[in-house]
Amino acid sequence: MRNSVLLRRIVLLLLSAVLLAGILTAAIYILVTQRMYMNMRVEELRPIAHTIADIMADMQQNGEYGRGVWPLLERDNKNFLGASLHIYNAKGESVMNPPRNLKQEEHNMRSANGGYDLTDEEIAPVIAADLRTILSGADVSGIRNSTDSRSYLVVGVPIKNETAVTGAIIFTKAMNELQDAANGLNLTLFISTLISFLIMLIPAYFATRRIVVPIRQMRDVAKAMAQGDYSVRADESQKGEIGELGRSMNHFAAESERLEQTRRDYVANVSHELRTPIASIRAIGETLRDGMAKTEEKRALFYNNIVREALRLSRLVDDLLELSRLQSSAEAMQKKLFDLREVFKNVSNSFSYAAAETAVRFITEADMEHPICVFSNPDRIEQVLVIILDNAVKHTPAGGAVTLTSAAREGKIEVCVSNTGEGIPPEDLPYIFERFYKADKSHSGGGTGLGLSIAMEIMKELGESIRAESEGSGASFIFTLSLP
């Protein structure tokens, strides 16, 4: 597990998610709370500013702007919420001249605020634009930045008499409270993020282990199958997608094992099919070469055997090439409208004689009185019928019957070839269309085991279906054709 790439990725993903959550929380807190803090302080300081402005307006008639206001404000200066008060006349000149004892108190207040509060001289550049706005008769509020990049809340109102603006009241408050709170939050978020990551690391490790262990086991199964060992099986006990993957791999292993066995059987069958005619041709050739066929009658018999075995080899090669062409989609399947009765007539003429030679009755129960128009490839359909009928005749005992029928069903024409006899064993029925598969393992005459595979490939290329049915005795092969 220490070298697990998946574990490292999950831990990295977990860490990234926790860090992202912490960063987003801090960013949203700073953006939202700054606005909320400003609005709250503005709503608190603005009424105080208006009250002081009214007091200053009332004192205007006495001509005392600066020192005269301090006795009135000295009692309530602690209610300024830690903000600095600045008073200006109509010319924008500061008239804030607190007594000496209040100067010391102001110094103490600035020290308590971390040295962020500014004097009238220091604050002048920060509130210059706001002062002009206030002296024009408007209230102002907002956050301003000083030359040292510190933020200050500014709340200002004009001093008015009945005819004009005579001065300005401005509160300034350093935003260090919010910054201190943000710093505290960031530290808290960092610690909580680290603790959350460490806590989640343990369940993440065990959760990842539950995923990694079966995946590694499946990897070993895949390697074993790649080396030809299809007996291995993956763990199917896991729930969810891992268990489904295990079941899929086991199904793949079982199918691969069966296909491998089929391939081996095919190689054995093809080897047998090739060995028999080759050995026969070789034996006949050696006999003719050694001059052991003394009469023309014997030589003619040997020549006929050579031709028969050569034709047998030719059929095998032709079937292999035909299947290869179909599977590579090299053969074009051109469709057209045609009357299915013409195909039935052609195969009936051919197989009636072949069936009679083996004492098998050939019966056509299709409606030959009315046109059966279908949309397909007539040559390929006749080829499929020939394959199925040839197979049916070969597996029908003497005295049995092969029946050809057709019927319209669910928007298709279904063509059925059925025979009497022993039928197809249930364990062989699902594989009857596979390449080189023979239900009768002892059967070695005539066929190559490729006919039904060719029929299946043709029907696939035509976009149709073909199936086999067998219930105890006899078998039926049914394929569909599209109506126009």
Image (tube, helix red, strand yellow):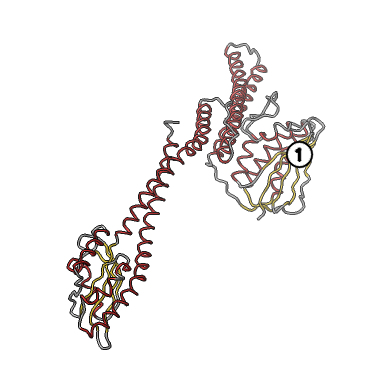
Tell me: residue 49, above or below residue 267.
Answer: below
**What residue appears at the point 22 percent right and 84 percent down from the top-left corner?**
62
Residue sitting nearer the eye, 281 or 50: 50
Q: Tell me where residue 15 appears, x and y as whole percent.
A: 41, 43
Tell me: residue 398, above or below residue 331.
Answer: above
Q: Which residue is mark 1?
A: 418
Tell me: residue 483, above or below residue 81.
Answer: above
Label 1 SS: strand
Residue sitting nearer the eye, 339 or 253: 253
Residue sitting nearer the eye, 420 or 389: 420
The quarter of the rendered structure image containing the N terminus is top left
Can residue 482 be seen at all in this image of the molecule? Answer: yes
Tell me: residue 396, above or below residue 46.
Answer: above
Label 1 crowd bin: few (<14), some (14–19), many (20+), radius 10 Å: many
**What residue appears at the point 70 percent right and 31 percent down from the top-left corner?**
428
Q: Amino acid at mark 1?
A: Ser
Which of the 4 image quadrants contains residue 478?
Answer: top right
